[in-house]
Amino acid sequence: MAFGTGGLATLSAVLAAIVAPVSPVATTPPTTAAQPSPAATPISVQRPIRYVQLAPGQTPPPGARVIDAKAPKPITVVTLLPAPAPRTVVVRTTQSGRIVP
C-alpha cells in the first residue's frame, strides 16, 4: 500500500511538471565597465526594399536607384556536365596487410 501511494504521488508530480507552464526567469547580469551597456551596442537593421512604378512625368526621390522597365530581365543559365567515369583501383596486399607495389 505504501508503494502504491508513493507511485501516485510520483505520477502526480511528473504530470504537474509536464502540464504546468514554465515561468520565465528574468535575471539581468550585473553590468561592469568591461561590458558595454545594451543601449551602446550598435544594432544593424536591414530595411525592406520597396519597388514603385513611377507614372509618366514623375521623378524618383533623391538617392533612389532607378531600374529601367524596358531593360532585359537577367537570365540564369545552368549547364550540367557529366561526371567523369569512376576508375577501378586495385590494391594488392600480402597476408600481413603490407601493400604490394
Image (tube, grey):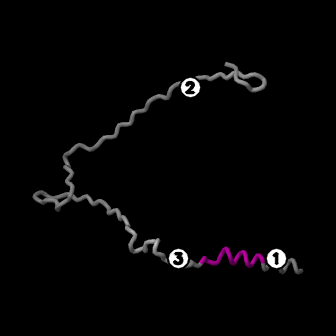
Q: Residue at x 28, y 43 (%)?
A: 74
Task: Name the kind of residue labelled 2 in the image.
Answer: Pro
Q: Is residue 60 above or below residue 92?
A: below
Q: Earlier in the sequence, mark 2 or mark 1?
A: 1
Name the residue rendered at 39%, 74% in the picture.
39
For discs 2 and 3, the disc positioned in front in the rendered view? 3
Lateral position of residue 9 relative to residue 20, left or right: right
How far apart are labels 3 and 1 at the CA level?
41 Å
Quickly name the residue at label 3. Answer: 29
**Disc 2 crowd, CA 10 A, few/some/many (<14, 14-19, 20+):** few
Name the spot of residue 68 as percent of width and height, x first.
Answer: 19, 49
Residue 88: quarter of image: top right
Specify which label sits upstream in the sequence, 3 or 1: 1
Nearer to the camera, 91 or 22: 91
Mark 2 lies on residue: 86
Tell me where residue 29 appears, x and y as whole percent.
52, 76
User: Circle 2 sits in a helix, a strand or a loop, which is it?
Assistant: loop
35 or 99, which lies in front?
A: 35
CA distance for labels 2 and 1: 63 Å
Q: Quadrant of the N terminus?
A: bottom right
Q: Which amino acid type is marked by label 1?
A: Gly
Magenta segment includes 14: yes
Position of residue 42 measured from the top left corner of the image (x, y, whole percent) = 37, 67
Q: Residue at x 88, y 80 (%)?
A: 2
Task: Relative to 4, say whether 95 is above or below.
Answer: above
Label 3 CA crowd tier, 10 Å (few <14, some 14–19, many 20+): few
Determine crowd level at label 1: few under 14, some 14-19, many 20+ residues with C-alpha closer than 10 A: few
In the image, what residue type sits under mark 3? Pro
Q: Which residue is mark 1?
A: 7
- The residue at 87%/77% (across/down) is 3
Q: Which residues are magenta?
A: 10-22
Q: Say what secondary structure mark 1 lies in.
A: helix
